[in-house]
Amino acid sequence: MRRNFVEQLHEQLESLEDTEILEIDGASISAIDRFGVALAKGLDLVEAPKDVNGVRTVLREYPHEPKHLFFIWRDADVLLEADVDLFGRLVNAFIGSAAERELITLDVLVLQRIVFLGGDKLGAYAEDPEGALATWLVDGDDDPFDEVKKCLSHPPVITYRLEG
């Protein structure tokens, strides 16, 4: 059912003018190094980001300026189960950088979105009021998304269940 959803979603998104789509296969991602490699492969980067700050930098400095930029992270629950803290920090990086592109930056407007796909654990995490899909995380003393948090009280997330 999820595979069919991804195929149909990808097809629908491709019909939008000036759209880039990156699929991240999360089935074997259980640590930041594997996530960095997957992201680098999808974006044709020379060097993979080695930590969450590197991922955040890649997302902020994405070299193209399409009207729409979509990330589809399949099996995101694999990393969630392996390292909930890392997963939350990556969620924060994706959603925060998307909000920056839309609300803060003076560059060309790029509507960036991410779709997280996974099983029941991902659904439970989405319902957790302390999780990164429901609240902004504080990532160190120098909060990288301080400006975004002034505009949005919480991450703009919509949750759907594909299975009954």
Image (tube, rainbow, N blue to C red):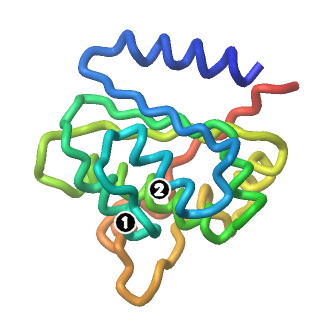
Q: Nearer the viewer, residue 121 or 58?
A: 58
| Image: 118 above or below 91 | above
Q: Secondary structure at mark 1?
A: helix
Which residue is painted at 35% across and 40% down in the image?
Answer: 43
- Give whichever of 130, 26 is nearer the camera: 26
Residue at image point 71% right, 57% down: 80
Q: Are marks 1 and 2 in contact (CB under 8 Å)?
A: yes
Residue 12 percent location from the top left of the image:
47, 12
The mark found on residue 54 in the picture is: 1
Numbered disc 2: secondary structure: helix
Local crowd size for mark 1, using a 10 Å CA cut-off: few (<14), some (14–19), many (≥20) = some
Q: Residue furthest bottom?
A: 141
Q: Name the residue located 66 percent from the left edge and 46 percent from the top edge.
A: 76
Instruction: Report the front residue among 40 and 61.
Output: 40
Residue that badge 2 annotates: 36
**Above/below status of 86 relative to 38:** below
Quarter of the figure with the C terminus: top right
Picture residue at 78% right of the left edge, 59% below the top: 81
